Image (cartoon, grey):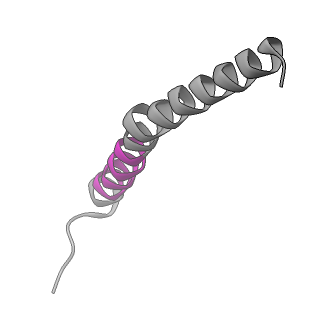
């Protein structure tokens, strides 16, 4: 392998690690918070419009 190919492999590896860290530390937790918050908000709005659940 030439020096250029080794540099490309190292650059690709670094990019892959940074993308993995971004996905696991920022994107997935952020999406989880948005989904859970959105679900809670939808239940809250539903109960405002229809009243509390009766049992």
Question: Which segment did they paint magenta?
Answer: 32-45
Q: Along the horizontal axis of the image, is 4 left or right of 13? A: right
Residue 48, image x, y percentages: 27, 53
User: Farthest left residue?
Assistant: 55
In the image, taking residue 47 as reference, residue 12 lies left or right, namely right
User: At 83% from the left edge and 25% from the top edge, which residue is drawn?
Assistant: 1
Q: Main secondary structure of the magenta part?
A: helix
Q: In the image, residue 10 lies at what x, y percent?
A: 65, 22
Is residue 4 magenta-colored?
no
Q: Residue 43 colored magenta?
A: yes
Q: Position of residue 55 (x, y in %)?
A: 15, 87
Residue in the foreground of this view, choosing between 35 and 15? 15
Q: Nearer the viewer, residue 47 or 30?
A: 30
* Percent coordinates x, y for residue 24 in the rendering: 43, 41
Quarter of the figure with residue 53: bottom left
Identified at 74% across, 21% down, the residue is: 6
Left or right, 7 with respect to 55, comes to right
Name above or below for residue 16 compared with residue 14: below
Residue occupying image coordinates x 38% and y 53% = 42
User: Could you tell me which residue is drawn at 36 percent across and 58 percent down?
Assistant: 46
Outermost residue to the front: 1
* Number of marks drawn: 0
Q: Is residue 14 above or below residue 52?
A: above
* Residue farthest to the bottom, as pictured: 55
């Amino acid at each position: 392998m030439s020096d250029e190919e080794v540099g490309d492999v190292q650059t690709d590896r670094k990019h892959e690690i940074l993308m993995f860290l971004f996905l696991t530390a920022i994107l997935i937790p952020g999406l989880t918070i948005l989904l859970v918050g959105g679900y809670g908000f939808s239940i809250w709005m539903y109960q405002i419009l229809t009243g509390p659940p009766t049992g």
